[in-house]
Amino acid sequence: MIAGNLNHIIDQVVKDKGIDRDVLVDALESAVLSAANKKYRNTRDLEAHFNEESGLVDVFEFVTVVDEVIDSYKEIDLNEAREIDPDVEVEDSLGMMLEAGSFSRIAAQTAKQVIIQKVREAEREGVYNEFKDRVGEVVNGIVRRYERGDLIVDLGRAEALLPNREQAPRENYRQSDRVRAYISEVKMSSKGPQIILSRTHPGLLISLFSSEVPEVAEGIVEIKGAVREPGSRAKIAVVSHDLDVDPVGACVGMRGSRVQNVVTELRGERIDIIPWTPDPARFACASLAPAEVSRVYIDDEGQSMEIIVPDDQLSLAIGKKGQNVRLAAKLIGWRIDIKSETSAQEEEQAQEQAQEQEQEQEQEAPVTEAAEENDSAVDVATEVAPVASDDASDTDTETTNTED
């Protein structure tokens, strides 16, 4: 019903937009059918079919053959129907193709709008299907604009959002700047697919090392964990599955070239590379490097540990504003309490004194109880003595009376 051969247009749209041909044909048929229904005010039974040979969308009106017509829009007399198809019988459904000239300009405009909408929906679906399985990847994009602090990044086929909360501190971008970010989430909304990027996610650090270190990409070296305070400092734990490969050395690279590339990408963020071990105490000591550790006390049930360090290593172990110990605790997943040797000794002495006092009190307790028992015995004797005297006087009196 649309003038001209549509095959060329369909092929061009499929090529440019990457839309499946069947989806576009269905969109065309739906668009033309919508326009036809609007033209006839939904009073007729219509169907639209794309003709591959002619390249046109034909609209057919279907009516039921009856002996007596009641609804002229949906029924046709038997005699009139046989003029169209001599073999038709009563209760048969007869399809008649409508003329192209029966559509108004408004109906054609409606068809155009529906086609555009269908193409847009197909594009959105295609973008969502392309990126939904790419969560966790690092992508390159071009900064297009700022919207209320959020960054709109062009990824080619789609635009992504880098929210203000996912931007690292002290990182500034201008229009047309290139940005490398981590895909943290892909979701479908009423406005289409939303691709959320992040520059603060620990996965960005892991992905950057995977691209810079071949041993990590090949699985020889495994990154067991990564924690960050974006823009300031980060720690990663690595382990080697090959005895001949040093995991820390592989990540550092020749003269620090590999780790330096990651640091440059993260705008100067310091990175500590730590050898992973299944022993929590050893892992904690390595996580607090470069600080030295004297001894570790572990509470397995409470998933906590007390770490004693030399007095001159305390500030180094804690780090600026507690950053070093905070990152170490996140990396190993345990609660860490750091104390200096002096404070630990003072606490031990205080505990020893408290225990001695408790022991002294326990030893004094029986003596006090014995004294209290003796005092009670004296009181009882004192109370009984006068009674005995009175009885004795009475006895003497009675004896005297007897003698008399």
Image (cartoon, helix red, strand yellow):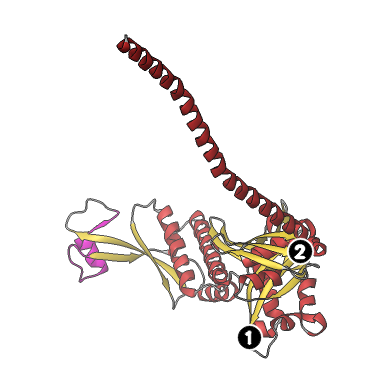
In the rendered structure, does residue 261 fall within the stretch colored magenta? Answer: no
| Quarter of the rendering containing residue 82 | bottom left
Label located before the other in sequence (1 or 2): 1
Q: Quadrant of the N terminus?
A: bottom left
Q: Which mark is residue 317?
A: 2
Q: Secondary structure at mark 1?
A: loop
Residue located at (52% from left, 40% from top): 370
Residue 153 can be seen in this image = no
- Rendered position, 53 above or below 135: below
Instruction: Please state the extent of the stretch shown in magenta in the rendering.
Output: 73-92
**Which residue is label 1 attached to?**
220
Nearest the viewer among 397 and 199 is 397
- Rendered position, 182 above or below 353: below
Nearest the viewer among 169 and 78 is 169
Q: Amino acid at mark 1?
A: Ile
| Quarter of the rendering containing residue 124 | bottom right
Residue located at (40% from left, 15% from top): 393
Nearest the viewer among 10 and 308 is 308
Q: Amino acid at mark 2?
A: Ala
Place of residue 344 in the rendered image (x, y in percent of width and height, measured from the top left) = 72, 58
Place of residue 40 in the rendered image (x, y in percent of width and height, measured from the top left) = 39, 53
